[in-house]
Amino acid sequence: MSYGISLDIGTSGTRGHAVDLSNGKILSTAVTECHPLPGANIMDHLTFCINVGTDVAHKILIDTVNKVIAQLGVDLNQVDRVSICGNPIQLSLFQGIPVDDLAFAGENAHKARGIKEQKRDAGVFSAVDVGLNVRDGCELYVPPAIRHEIGADALAMMYKSGFLDEKENCMVTDYGTNAEMALKVGDEIYTGSAAAGPAMEGQSIQCGMLAGPGAISDLEWDVQYICKVLDDTITPQDGAKVDFSLETVEDFGPMSGKATGITGTGVVAAVEAALSSRLYKKGKLKTSDGKLHMQDGVYIDSKDVSEALKAIGAIRAGHFTLLEHAGLKFDEMTVMYMAGASGTYVDAEKARAVGLVPPSCKTIYQYGNTSLAMATDILRDPELLDKLQDIANGIRANHIMFAGDKIFEQIYMQELAVCDEGMSMEMYNSNNAMMGIQELPKARGRATVNRVVTRDIPDLGEKGLTILHDIGTELRGTMEGCIGCKKCEQECPQHALTVTDDKEIVVKTKDCLGTACYRCQFVCPKKVYKYDNLKLTL
């Protein structure tokens, strides 16, 4: 037998397929519940890598990838090919390539720091040399970045969705922690990447989880809301009926009693329900206990809604910014392609209602995990790698760095005001008009929705899905002057930190929010706790 392994190295976790190379058939699937590095977004991972060094970050990620491929149930001594896909930072961490050129943007910044821009073209490498536990001679196939800021994952969402062949003005977005997006106007493509944050993946949400068995993925309206819960094949099935106004929950479908959390698309559905029911005003849920209760003890609270709206706001600001830079009005952009887990499971009409899809869109296509799908295509046809390089070379992409972009800054500020202060859309548009920015129109009518797949990983293989929880490592350290009060432990929102009887601080990397949080450090009454002084356990 000859096997191949395809991998999607994502910001929210790693996903892998085992493939029979004799017939191209997918045999099994394994995924992690999160990323092994501290942090909930790409910038956190980048900062961690800069702080601890590329070698350390590479070792942590490769350890996790080896755990993933060990769960695929094939003889690793018979693996001939491995293919990967992901954004430039994740693939660089995987390959052990320095990320300084990604951390510091601009030619002047590179010159000042003596940074050399890394090549990220398509290539075939030794899988063993990278650190994978496969046989000697196993080849590693890496697809190209379009430019160093626009990675193979962006190429995947354009290539696999049909976006590149679309004749109308259109947009594509891979909805996730780091939301890659592109706008096509004729032969010109405008790209950007919005750090939407972990809420889109169901993380940093009280009852949140990634899309997996037991996750509430949607709320379907039928006199009452019906919870849609993912079963063991990651397919949505009916759960309980809920009435948020009356605050009642009633068993109904086969997944009643089987929910263990809520994923990002379920959060979007709950937010849409809260907004349409007028239960969320000025940053607060207007229920008896400030929560929207679903089934099996799963709920979202006001903080969850706020986190979700900030993520939605970042994505809408990104869409808005691409249109402004292209000189395109909303009404001139009517076709949307949605990729990623959130782009698969979310109700497209609800997504349009809350702002994840431009209101002008009349036709919406929903695809699954295009990154893993393209990696699997490369396994089946290695010559595709050359074709993808030609496509990448031919894309005339105008990349817009949202960080520091005045249009993005203005629109995102308005989004935050709508979320937390209840700003009206009339004031939103009036403020933007003063900056010379077009009006955000209201959604009218219903869009034609084409759901291409029923789950983000359409084919799990005959051996099915395995979810890994045991990943990552620990940060440890003692702080001179520590009194052992454990306030840092109590403050940690992810319960990633513990303080031992010997006053040693232990942080689980996979659970830690990293540099985006630092609440453990800020709460220290003696100001002796320094997060960056913790050392890695490998």
Image: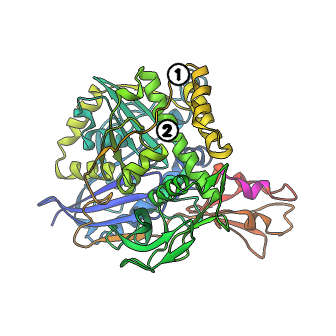
Quadrant for the C terminus in the image: bottom right
Question: Residue 5 appears at what percent x and percent y?
Answer: 27, 59
Does the image show residue 49? no
> In the displayed image of the protein, which residue is found farthest to the left?
23
| Residue 70 falls in image quadrant | bottom left
Magenta stretch containing residue 520, yes or no?
yes
Question: Residue 372 appears at what percent x and percent y?
Answer: 31, 53
Query: Main structural element of the magenta stretch: helix, strand or loop?
Result: helix
Q: How crowded is mark 1: few (under 14 residues within 10 Å), some or many (20 or more)?
A: few
Upstream in the sequence, badge 1 or badge 2? 1
Residue at position x 67%, y 68% from top?
Answer: 288
The numbered mark at residue 107 is 1
Question: Residue 11 appears at what percent x and percent y?
Answer: 47, 51
Marks 1 and 2, how far apart at CA: 29 Å
Q: Residues within 10 Å of mark 2 (few under 14, many from 20)?
A: many
Locate residue 80 relative to residue 435 in the image: left or right: left
Please state which amino acid type lies under the numbered disc 2. Arg
Name the foreground residue: 181 vs 257.
257
Locate residue 323 relative to residue 494 in the image: left or right: left
Residue stretch in magenta: 517-522
Quadrant for the N terminus in the image: bottom left
Residue at position x 56%, y 48% from top?
Answer: 309
Please state which amino acid type lies under the numbered disc 1. Glu
Name the foreground residue: 34 vs 57.
34
Name the foreground residue: 307 vs 432.
432
Compared with 484, 345 (above or below) is: above
Compared with 515, 335 (above or below) is: above
Element assignment for label 2: helix
Instruction: Give the labeled residue for mark 2.
Output: 316
Residue at position x 84%, y 60% from top?
Answer: 480
